[in-house]
Structure formats: structure tokens, C-alpha cells
Amino acid sequence: MNPPKHVAIIMDGNGRWGIKKKNSRNYGHKKGLETVEKIINEAIKNKIKYLTLFVFSTENWKRPNSEIKYLFNLLSNYIESEINNLIKKNIRIKIIGNISIFPKLLKSKLKKVEKKTKSLDKIQINMALNYGSREEITNSFKKIKKKNILITKRNIEQNLYTSGIPDPEILIRTGNTYRISNFMVWQSIYSEIFFVKKMWPEFTKNDFNNILKEFDSIKRKFGGLDE
Ligand code: IPE
Ligand code: IPE
Ligand code: MG
């Protein structure tokens, strides 16, 4: 099996799962983090080099403050408690998205983990935080204008948050919802898309491996014809 270089995941369904379990949306987020840890390990086992996780979108600010706060706390605690483990496991963390408007302490923790793991190369986890494709693409054009360089596909790509990262061969969305929600629109034009009925906290390493297996059997033609 030839592993994909890059898998991107829209981790959807935490809230509904929490409610279904007669608990809270936030309980779902907490359980969702356990799935994150499982899938990172599974991605490493499968020799995947880039794993992009959609954690917080530019649209998620519309949620109640209490939920946003809970998510940020979860993230903050995760980084604090996991940073040494990440380093030990040779994992690089990269933030994609605009975190300039995040709470100060969280921002500094995120910058710190990015800096401390910069040279690690077992796998790169791209954490999409306050990420939206439209912002990303608009931002790229702004940078191009500032640099006074030509608008070319290459220059647009090189000024995205994901500059230098190969496009995801696989895009997964859990949560039984069939849309892209402003995620990696530029990068996913030829991604194989897997919509999963299960909610993110229910998603298992088996589900992940089955997707990799199915991917392996797909003939990718990129507009051409079968050999
Ligand atoms: C997790 O799922 C995605 C995040 C924004 C953290 P949701 O919180 O969107 O859960 P559902 O879709 O409402 O069930
Ligand atoms: C997408 O899920 C964002 C993340 C997984 C972080 P949403 O739950 O925000 O998407 P919509 O609102 O259902 O499209
Ligand atoms: Mg959702």
C-alpha cells in the first residue's frame, strides 16, 4: 500500500454526540480530543507525513461564548500537557489560520509549541485554527499585492497558510454532514473525499484504516484517462 502524504479531516459531530449521550456539547468536545490522539498515532503508523485537523473555523465564532471558551481551554490544556510527548514522538505542530486575535495566553502557547517542534519530522500536524479558505485565499492575494509579484497559481499557492505542503490526497468529514464548510477549498480540488456517518468521538482507528484501504484502490486520473 502506498500511503497518502497528506490527510485532512473535518472533525465534525462532537456536539451532537455529547447530546446523544445525554450529556453536553462540551462533553462531546472532550471525547473528540481522545479521537484526535488516536488518529494521530494511526497516521504515524501509516507513515502519513501531514495530517491537517480542522479545529476551529472562521465561522465558529458564531457559537455561544461558553462553548468557544471551553474549546480554547481544551486546546490550551492539551498543548500544555502534551508538548513534551509531542517532542518525544518527533511530531511537528503547525498552525494554519489567523490566531492573531486569539486570547494572549493561548496564542503564546501555540507559538511556543510551533517553535519547539519546528525541526521535528515524523509527522506534521497542521492545526486549523480560526481557519477559513476564503480568508486564506484573500490573504494570499493581499500578500501578493504587497510583494508586487504576479498573480500566478504558484504565487497564490506559495502565499497560502499551507505554502509548501502537498495537497491532501484524502479529505475526511465525519458527522454525517455533506459539505466543505470553508475548509481547504484551494487545496482539495483533487482530494478523494470521504463523508463518514459517524460522529467524530465515535470515529475509530479501524474506520481510518478502512478509508486508507479504500483510497488505495481508487484510480486517480486528474482529468486524464486510465492507462
Ligand atoms: C466539532 O463538532 C467541530 C468543532 C467546531 C469543534 P461540532 O461542535 O460542530 O459538533 P456538531 O456538528 O454540532 O455535532
Ligand atoms: C466545521 O464544522 C468546522 C470544524 C470541524 C472545526 P461546523 O460544525 O462548524 O460546520 P457547519 O456549520 O456544520 O457547516
Ligand atoms: Mg458541526
Image: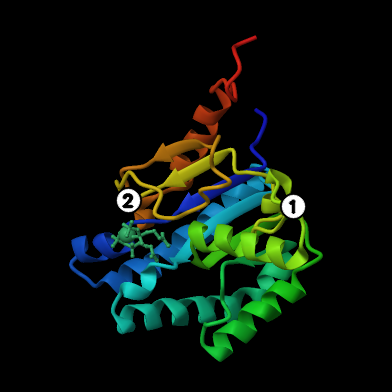
Residue drawn at 66 percent across, 75 percent down: 83
Of the residues tagged 1 and 2, which is closer to the observer? 1
> In which image quadrant can residue 128 be found?
bottom right
Q: Which quadrant of the rendered structure holds the C terminus?
A: top right
| Front residue of 159 and 210 | 159
Colouring chosen for the image of the structure: rainbow
> Which amino acid lies under the numbered mark 2 shown in the image of this protein?
Gly
Q: Which mark is residue 175?
A: 2
Which of the four quarters of the rendered structure image does ligand 1 lie in? Answer: bottom left
Residue that carries the numbered disc 1 in the rendered image: 150
> In which image quadrant can residue 218 be found?
top right
All told, the count of numbered labels is 2
| Front residue of 179 and 81 | 179
Q: CA distance from mark 1 to mark 2?
A: 40 Å
Left/right placement of residue 55 relative to residue 187 reads left
The answer to whether the residue bearing label 2 lies less than 8 angstroms from the nearest atom of ligand 1 is: yes
> In which image quadrant can residue 93 be found?
bottom right
Left/right placement of residue 113 relative to residue 101 reads right
| Front residue of 126 and 149 | 149
> Which amino acid lies under the numbered mark 1 shown in the image of this protein?
Leu
Where disc 1 sits, the SS reads loop
Residue 90 in sight here: yes
User: Looking at the image, which residue sits at the far right?
Assistant: 119
Q: Position of residue 115 (x, y in %)?
A: 75, 75
Q: Which quadrant of the rendered structure holds the N terminus?
A: top right
Q: Position of residue 225 (x, y in %)?
A: 59, 13
Q: Position of residue 76 (x, y in %)?
A: 53, 81
Left/right placement of residue 110 relative to residue 176 reads right
Q: Are marks 1 and 2 in contact (CB under 8 Å)?
A: no
Q: Position of residue 103 (x, y in %)?
A: 51, 87
